[in-house]
Image (tube, rainbow, N blue to C red):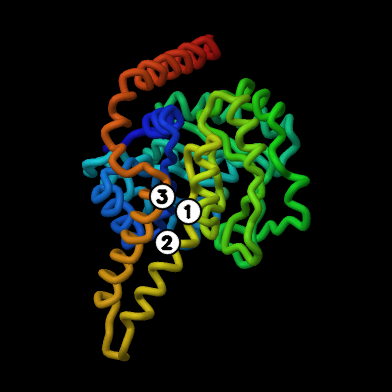
Amino acid sequence: MLVNMNEVLIPAKKNRYAVGLFNAVNLELARGIIAAAESTQSPVIMGTAEILLPYGPLDEVSYYLIPMAKKSSVPVVVHLDHGLTYDTCIKALELGFSSIMYDCSTDSYDENVRKVKEMAEIAHSYGATIEGELGHVGDNEGSAEGSNHLEDPSKYFTDPKLAKDFVDKTGVDALAIAVGNAHGAYKLPPKLDFERIRTIAGTVDVPLVLHGGSGLTDNDFRQAIKEGISKVNIFTDINIAAVEAEFKRFTSMDKGVIDLIPAAVEAVKQEAMKKMKLFSSDGKAGMSSESTGITDIETLTKIVAAEVAKYLNKQ
Ligand SMILES: [Zn+2]
């Protein structure tokens, strides 16, 4: 079933597990991710990011992701990761994405607040959820998700006090934080600031998101989730797993693409299942629907409030 992020992250935050976001820029990735979620009975978030659009345009990706989510036996969020522009976020909402991230983390604090608050009102009027980012998560060299390599990432770590102010002012449903994580494959083992995760989790009410999950150790994940992370973004690991499996399967020149597709789907499934078990979201598919009653009322209230505001603006 297609759900928004609150429906899977509120129970995750309450029960101290995390839900994975896996980008699905082609059908093999999407099939592998959904198969993993159904096989582990896990809620899941899948989608694409603005920087990944050259590999699959937003509308085309939506044509398979949204029906696949609706048809699935487990809760699936279809999410735009790192929306960088107003227009892309609006397009995702119009196409039926149930969640977006509006990443204005390279803007000034005030500008980040202003832009995300405006987008939060719009997203909520669609019944969709929104994630913001405070501090800035940089990119490892060669990352598919960007090339913003930070010399001293600690300068961009999320400030816990500002985090509370940001969440209160913008109305975001989830917050991405910078705590020593980075996108892409890490050259040196990352050192996460667990103390900071704990402090932020104790300061803000919304679920926290860890970007750049590929390459962290199993213990890093367990501890980060214990300290208060409720969503983990994974792309590099499934991206590489798919191509490694295809490479192994490509034993002679007479192999065609249909010989490689099943290998890629299975590899993505196995890799995603590993993460779902590690994040303890396995067996939690039922948890999400339990919370639907509450979040539906919240969503409905937001929709009505947004409609009233629109009406009053026209008067
Ligand atoms: Zn990210």
Measuring from the top left, give residue 157's x and y in whole percent: 71, 42
Residue 234: which numbered mark, if any? Answer: 1
User: Is residue 248 rendered to the left or right of residue 236?
Assistant: left
Which one is nearer the viewer's eye here, 116 or 137? 137
Quadrant for the N terminus in the image: top left
Measuring from the top left, give residue 287's x and y in whole percent: 31, 31
Q: Type of residue at label 2? A: Ile
Q: Give how far apart the Cα atoms at labels 1 and 3 are.
A: 13 Å
Residue beneath label 2, please? 238
Under circle 1, the secondary element is strand
Pointers 1 and 3 in contact (C-beta within 8 Å): no
Q: Type of residue at label 1? A: Ile
What residue lies at 45% left-to-right and 51% top-to-bottom?
Answer: 48
Q: Type of residue at label 3? A: Leu
**Other-residue count near label 3 (Cα within 10 Å), few / some / many at <14 / 14–19 / ≥20:** some
Residue beneath label 3, please? 278
Which one is nearer the viewer's eye here, 205 or 30? 205
Image quadrant assignment for residue 216? bottom right
Mark closest to the chain's N terminus, 1 or 3: 1
Residue 279 seen? yes
Residue 6 seen? no
Under circle 2, the secondary element is helix
Which one is nearer the viewer's eye here, 22 or 258? 22
What residue lies at 40% left-to-right and 40% top-to-bottom?
Answer: 97
**Other-residue count near label 2 (Cα within 10 Å), few / some / many at <14 / 14–19 / ≥20:** many
What residue lies at 65% left-to-right and 31% top-to-bottom?
Answer: 199
User: Is residue 64 rendered to the left or right of residue 195?
Assistant: left
Q: Give how far apart the Cα atoms at labels 1 and 2 are.
A: 7 Å
